[in-house]
Image (cartoon, rainbow, N blue to C red):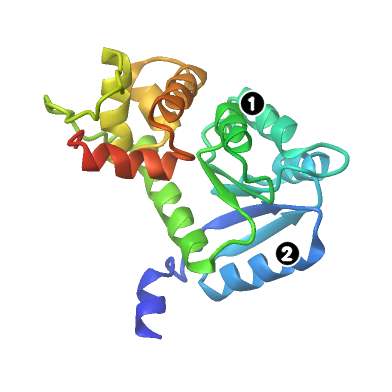
Amino acid sequence: MANDASRSPSVAAPKTILVVDDDPNLVFLVQDYLELKGYRVLTAAHGRDALVVLGQETPDMIICDVMMPQMDGYNFVRHVRENQQISWLPVLFLSAKGQTQDRVMGLNTGADVYMVKPFDPDELLAQIEASLKQSERLRQGNQPALEPVTPDLPPGVELTPTETKILQYVAKGLSNREIAADLHVSQRTVESHVSNMLGKTGLHNRTELARWAMEHRFA
């Protein structure tokens, strides 16, 4: 129990998470679990519903399904990223669509993290905490400096100088949004490079790419 308490946010100032999913059972389970960990949870049944919620209150993070009625997750996240007032919000896709192209599509659409159902609650909590820390770091403008690296690339993998620089940031745990802010480029540009690197390395998601980058001395 002590370990769980140490991982929970401050009771005095709980972080708010918006959960968007058309499965009421999943929403209930995620809400119950996160509230147990000290988070405040808002819910919406689909993208249009979620936009109404965002018009009334700004959460600290969004967890969103992909396949939903009214407005799916892709279109919802596009609306979020196009709104300057909330474009900074961390977004985690939680979807039953787990193919490589689904993950790449999710990340290219603007999600920071893509997890596949069924999921491990501890992994979900870890991803939430990491995303919130990254968001706070971005808002405070406290970016870690990059140092020259000599990566140990496997045969057949060739990266451009820009990809190498972005991969250094990925290895340090920064989100696509944070990398874009530090490099003064659009988030879409970073997402495109990340997608290209997933294809070049044969990896499935950003978490695997970060682990791969550390293994090959990018950090």
Tell me the residue at 75%/46% (across/down). Answer: 53
Task: State whether residue 203 is above or below residue 133.
Answer: above
Whether residue 173 appears in this view of the structure is no
Whichever of callouts 2 and 1 sits on the residue coming sooner in the sequence is 2
- Residue 187 spot, x, y in % from top left: 48, 22
Dot 1: within a 10 Å radius of its alpha carbon, few (fewer than 14), some, or many (20 or more) residues? few
Q: Which residue is mark 2?
A: 26
Q: Which residue is mark 1?
A: 83
In this orientation, which residue lies closer to the viewer: 17 or 30? 30
Tell me the residue at 61%/35% (across/down). Answer: 106
Q: Is residue 129 left or right of residue 92?
A: left
Please tell me whether mark 1 sits on a helix, a strand or a loop.
Answer: loop
Tell me the residue at 51%/70% (across/down). Answer: 38
- Marks 2, 1: nearer the viewer: 2
Dot 2: within a 10 Å radius of its alpha carbon, few (fewer than 14), some, or many (20 or more) residues? few
In this orientation, which residue lies closer to the viewer: 9 or 199? 199
Q: CA distance from mark 2 to mark 1?
A: 28 Å
Residue closest to the far right:
70
Please tell me whether mark 2 sits on a helix, a strand or a loop.
Answer: helix
Q: Quadrant of residue 147?
A: top left
In this orientation, which residue lies closer to the viewer: 21 or 13? 21
Residue type at tag 1: Asn
